[in-house]
Image: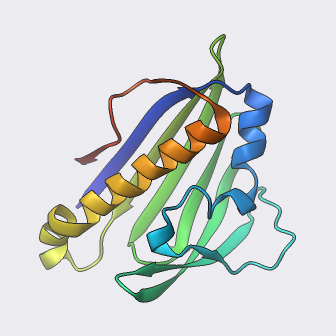
């Protein structure tokens, strides 16, 4: 089964500032909850651009998980998409979009993902994965808005639905 996670909000920062924040790999650990122990493994300096590969490790329930993503779409100041090449999901496709407005910048996250092990993934999703992803993206929203300035949510909360 495929799932879709979305988050949609406005930050006070202008488009240039917002894009600069999101296009820096060194901000990834800051927007990831500390309990995941996010560690970038890609040698520095890291340039996020079209076809860039990012290697990192997270710790899930005490188990280190190696993750590699590739930037498959890099449209400066409009959007970028990272795709998991190696990691815990069968599919992890994360689209980040940005739109300048009079209020600041509209930020949208859309993640399409699929879990491994079809027989038990629905139960695991309900009991563990969905609650943890909601916590991760709520934390992410909190840090982003602290760094860039909060305006308002365009959806009440992070949402996850089956596709």
122 shown above or below 98: below
Q: Position of residue 129 (x, y in %)?
A: 27, 66
Q: Position of residue 40 (x, y in %)?
A: 67, 75
19 shown above or below 56: above
Which of the 4 image quadrants contains residue 72? bottom right
Which of the 4 image quadrants contains residue 10? top right
Q: Nearer the viewer, residue 146 or 91?
A: 146
Q: Nearer the viewer, residue 61 or 34?
A: 34
Q: Position of residue 121 (x, y in %)?
A: 19, 72
Q: Residue at x 73, y 45 (%)?
A: 21
Determine the residue located farthest toward the top in the rendered image: 102
64 shown above or below 113: below
Q: Is residue 20 left or right of residue 146?
A: right
Residue 80 at least partly seen? yes
Q: Nearer the viewer, residue 53 or 46?
A: 46
Residue 75 at least partly seen? no
Q: Residue at x 59, y 58 (%)?
A: 82
The type of colouring in the image is: rainbow
Q: Residue at x 68, y 71 (%)?
A: 54
Q: Is residue 109 left or right of residue 104?
A: left
């Amino acid at each position: 089964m495929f799932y879709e996670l979305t988050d949609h909000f406005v930050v006070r920062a202008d488009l240039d500032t917002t894009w600069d924040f999101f296009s820096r790999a060194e901000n990834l650990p800051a927007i990831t909850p500390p309990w995941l122990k996010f560690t970038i493994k890609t040698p520095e300096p890291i340039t996020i651009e079209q076809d860039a590969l990012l290697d990192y490790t997270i710790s899930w329930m005490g188990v280190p998980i190696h993750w590699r993503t590739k930037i498959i779409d890099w449209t400066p100041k409009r959007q970028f998409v990272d795709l998991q090449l190696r990691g815990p999901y069968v599919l992890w496709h994360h689209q980040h979009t940005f739109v300048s407005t009079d209020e600041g910048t509209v930020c949208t996250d859309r993640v399409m993902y699929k879990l491994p092990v079809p027989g038990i993934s629905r139960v695991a999703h309900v009991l563990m994965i969905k609650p943890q992803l909601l916590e991760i993206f709520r934390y992410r929203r909190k840090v982003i808005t602290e760094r860039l300035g909060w305006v308002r949510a365009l959806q009440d909360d992070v949402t996850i639905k089956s596709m």
